């Protein structure tokens, strides 16, 4: 099941599981240590995630508004790959940005190896390549009509 929750709605158990998944993927697997994973954005964003019956995080993304009409999706991960969980979470994140944050433009910073994944979801490369936390990234944006 895919959930879209604010920080206060998460509760300590879900928050722990999300942070553990982020740590496992970003710090342990990708060895990102030059940039902090936890930041103030976590307190004010929408946490979009898919979990199983045991509460294990299968996929995750966070959404936040940068300015009226614009949103950003970040910290996208999957802990189980090749099952379509990342697509499901991203589609729900896009929906949350549009419906709950009122975004007609959504930006993200994509690692080079997953640019094609985001392009299939309607994002286009608008900048890059650039280094972010020691990994090559590209800026991407998707634009949507006002009507949903």
Image (cartoon, helix red, strand yellow):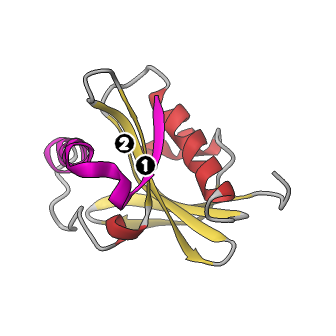
Element type at marker 2?
A: strand
In the image, which residues are magenta?
1-29
**Mark 2 residue crowding within 10 angstroms, few (<14) / some (14–19) / many (20+):** many
Residue that sits furthest to the bottom in the current view: 67
Q: Are marks 2 and 1 in contact (CB under 8 Å)?
A: yes
- 143 left or right of 115? right
Q: CA distance from mark 2 to mark 1?
A: 7 Å
| Residue 148 visible in the shown view | yes
- 146 left or right of 113? right
Q: Quadrant of residue 51?
A: top left
Residue in the image at 14% along x and 44% along y: 28
Is residue 68 shown above or below 85? Answer: below
Residue in the image at 26% along x and 29% along y: 56
- Is the magenta region chiefly helix, strand or loop? helix
* Residue 79 falls inside the magenta stretch: no
Is residue 128 shown above or below 81? Answer: below
| Residue 139 visible in the shown view | no
- 143 left or right of 139? right
Element type at marker 1?
A: strand
* Residue 23 falls inside the magenta stretch: yes
State the image coordinates of residue 37 (x, y, percent, origin top left): 24, 61
Q: What number of labels is visible?
A: 2
Residue corresponding to mark 1: 61
Is residue 124 shown above or below 122? Answer: below
Pick the residue in front: 46 or 140: 46
Pick the residue in front: 8 or 128: 8
Which mark, residue 77?
Answer: 2
């Amino acid at each position: 099941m895919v959930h879209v929750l604010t920080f206060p709605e998460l509760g300590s158990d879900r928050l722990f599981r999300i942070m553990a998944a982020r740590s496992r993927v970003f710090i342990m697997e990708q060895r990102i240590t030059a940039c902090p994973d936890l930041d103030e954005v976590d307190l004010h964003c929408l946490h979009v995630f898919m979990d199983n019956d045991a509460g294990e995080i299968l996929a995750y993304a966070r959404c936040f508004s940068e300015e009226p009409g614009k949103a950003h999706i970040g910290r996208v991960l999957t802990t189980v790959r090749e099952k379509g969980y990342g697509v499901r979470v991203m589609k729900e994140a896009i929906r949350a940005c549009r419906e709950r944050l009122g975004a007609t433009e959504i930006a993200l910073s994509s690692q080079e190896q997953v640019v094609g994944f985001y392009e299939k979801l309607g994002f286009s490369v608008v900048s890059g390549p650039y280094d972010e936390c020691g990994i090559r990234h590209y800026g991407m944006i998707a634009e949507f009509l006002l009507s949903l």
